[in-house]
Image (tube, rainbow, N blue to C red):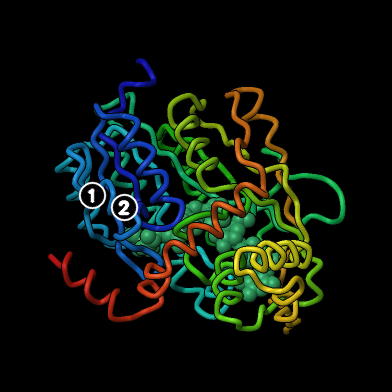
C-alpha cells in the first residue's frame, strides 16, 4: 500500500501551540486531504490560532475530550480516519508538579482511548497510521556531555515526562501486541508564535514588554535545545508521510542554550525592539527558587531524521527569535485574550454540544 493514500486525518490538540502549526501545514499543503482537528479547548487551546484557515473546505474543527472513551469511539466510527497525529496533552512541567493527576488523565488515559479506537479502524485499513508526538524529556537529564539518540533509555523525572513516557510505552505496546501501525517522534523545546505565555520564551517576552521580573529558576545554568515550531511542523509532515512504521525519530535544533544566556539574548533583542537603553531589560532578571526535579540538560542527536528523511532545521535561532518577538508584538490582543478568563469562557460556550 502506498504511503500517501492516507487522506482523512485526525489531528488532536490542533489549536494548541504546535498543533496549530501542524494543522495549518496540512490544510494548506494538502488540498485533497480532509483534516479533522479535535481539541478540548483547555486554557492552552485557542481557536484564534487558526482563524485564517477555519473556513477551509478541507478542514473541520471538533470540540471534544480525548479522556471520554465513548465520544472518541463514536468520532472514529463516524469518520473512519486513515491516520491520527496525536498532539493533545497537558504540556507544562510546572503544572504537572502541582497537579500530576490531570497529566495522567489526558496524557496516559487519553492516549490509550485513542489507541483503542484506532485498533478498530486499523483492522479494516492496512494503511492506517497512529503518529504519536512526544518529547525529549522522556530520556531524563544529560550531564555536561552527550546527546539523546533514539536508543537512549527512558528515565523521566517530572510527572509531565513520566506521563509522556508512559504514553510512548503504550503506543509501542499496541504496536507489539496488536500490530497497530505507529510512529513516534521525540522533540526538543519548541518556540515561536502561538505559544502560551507560561513557557520560558513567551513568558519572558511578555514580562519584558510589561516591565515585570524575569524569574530564572535556580542559577540559570540549565540547558535546553531550541527548535522553531514551524521546523517541527515540517518534520511531523515528513515523518507522517515517509517515516518507517514502528520506529522513533528524534527531532531537535542542534541549538543548545543555557537559560541565563538565552534570557540575556532575549533582553538584548527586546531592548532594541522597544528602543530601550541597552541593559534595561536585563535589570528585570530575578533568580528564584528552583523547579523541583529540574533536569540539567537536554540535547537531541537528530542524525537519524536528517540522514533517513533529509530533514534539518531551516530557521536560525536569531531569525526564529526575531520572528517570535515580532509576532508577540503584533499580537498583543492575542496575549490579552489567552490570559483572560472571559475569552476562554466565550469560545468554550460556542462549541458546547
Ligand atoms: P499545548 O499545551 O500548547 O497544546 C495542547 C493542546 O491539547 C491544547 O490545544 C489543548 O486544548 C489540547 N488538549 C489538552 N487536553 C486535551 C484533552 N483532554 N482532549 C483534547 N484536547 C486536549 O502543547 P504543545 O506545546 O503544543 O505540545 C503539543 C504536543 O507536543 C504535546 O504532546 C507535547 O507533549 C509535545 N511536545 C511539546 C514540545 C514543546 O516544546 N512545546 C516539545 C516536544 C513535544
Ligand atoms: O524538551 C521539550 C519540552 O520543552 C516539552 O516536552 C514541554 O512540553 C515544554 O513545556 C518544554 O519543557 P521545559 O520545562 O523545558 O520548558 P519551559 O519553557 O517550562 O522551561 C524551559 C527552561 O526554563 C527550563 O529549564 C525551566 C526554565 N524556566 C522556565 C520558566 C517557565 C525558568 O527558569 N523560569 C521560568 O519562569
Q: Is residue 206 left or right of residue 319?
A: left
**Label 1's element?**
loop
Q: Nearer the viewer, residue 62 or 195?
A: 195
Farthest residue in the right direction?
A: 144
Q: Is residue 21 left or right of residue 258?
A: left
Q: Position of residue 28 (x, y in %)?
A: 32, 35
Residue at x-position 31% and y-position 52%? 50
Quickly name the residue at label 1: 54
Please tell me whether residue 234 is drawn above or below residue 191 in the rendered image: above
Within 10 Å of disc 2 (Cα), the crowding (few <14, some 14-19, many 20+) is some
Residue at x-position 37% and y-position 70%? 333
Q: Position of residue 289 (x, y in %)?
A: 73, 84
Quickly name the residue at label 2: 50
Residue 301 sits in which quadrant? top right
Q: Nearer the viewer, residue 216 or 162?
A: 216
Please tell me whether residue 65 is drawn above or below residue 153 in the rendered image: below
Amino acid at each position: 500500500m502506498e504511503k500517501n493514500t492516507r487522506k482523512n486525518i485526525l489531528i488532536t490538540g490542533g489549536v494548541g501551540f504546535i498543533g496549530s502549526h501542524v494543522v495549518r501545514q496540512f490544510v494548506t499543503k494538502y488540498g485533497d486531504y480532509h483534516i479533522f482537528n479535535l481539541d478540548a479547548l483547555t486554557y492552552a487551546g485557542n481557536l484564534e490560532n487558526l482563524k485564517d484557515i477555519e473556513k477551509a473546505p478541507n478542514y473541520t474543527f471538533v470540540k471534544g475530550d480525548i479522556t471520554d472513551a465513548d465520544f472518541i469511539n463514536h468520532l472514529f466510527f463516524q469518520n473512519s480516519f486513515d491516520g491520527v497525529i496525536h498532539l493533545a496533552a497537558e504540556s507544562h512541567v510546572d503544572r504537572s508538579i502541582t497537579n500530576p493527576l490531570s497529566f495522567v488523565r489526558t496524557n496516559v488515559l487519553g492516549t490509550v482511548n485513542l489507541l483503542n479506537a484506532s485498533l478498530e479502524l486499523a483492522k479494516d485499513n492496512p494503511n492506517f497510521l497512529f503518529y504519536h508526538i512526544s518529547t525529549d524529556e522522556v530520556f531524563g537529564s544529560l550531564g555536561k556531555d552527550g546527546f539523546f539518540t533514539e536508543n537512549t533509555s527512558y528515565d523521566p523525572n517530572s510527572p509531565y515526562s513520566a506521563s509522556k513516557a508512559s504514553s510512548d510505552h503504550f503506543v509501542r505496546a499496541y504496536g507489539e501486541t496488536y500490530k497497530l501501525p505507529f510512529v513516534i517522534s521525540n522533540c526538543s523545546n519548541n518556540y515561536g508564535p502561538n505559544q502560551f505565555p507560561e513557557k520560558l520564551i513567551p513568558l519572558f517576552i511578555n514580562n519584558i514588554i510589561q516591565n515585570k521580573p524575569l524569574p530564572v529558576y535556580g542559577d540559570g545554568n540549565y540547558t535546553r535545545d531550541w527548535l522553531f515550531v514551524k521546523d517541527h511542523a515540517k518534520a511531523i509532515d515528513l515523518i507522517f508521510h515517509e517515516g518507517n512504521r514502528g520506529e522513533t525519530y528524534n527531532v531537535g535544533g542542534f541549538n543548545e542554550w543555557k537559560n541565563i544566556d538565552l534570557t540575556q539574548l532575549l533582553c538584548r533583542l527586546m531592548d532594541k525592539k522597544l528602543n530601550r537603553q541597552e541593559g534595561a531589560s536585563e535589570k528585570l532578571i530575578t533568580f528564584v527558587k528552583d523547579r523541583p526535579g529540574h533536569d540539567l540538560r537536554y540535547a537531541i542527536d537528530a542524525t537519524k531524521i536528517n540522514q533517513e528523511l533529509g530533514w534539518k532545521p531551516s530557521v536560525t535561532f536569531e531569525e526564529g527569535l526575531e520572528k517570535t518577538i515580532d509576532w508577540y508584538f503584533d499580537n498583543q490582543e492575542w496575549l490579552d485574550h489567552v490570559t483572560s478568563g472571559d475569552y476562554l469562557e466565550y469560545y468554550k460556550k460556542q462549541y458546547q454540544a
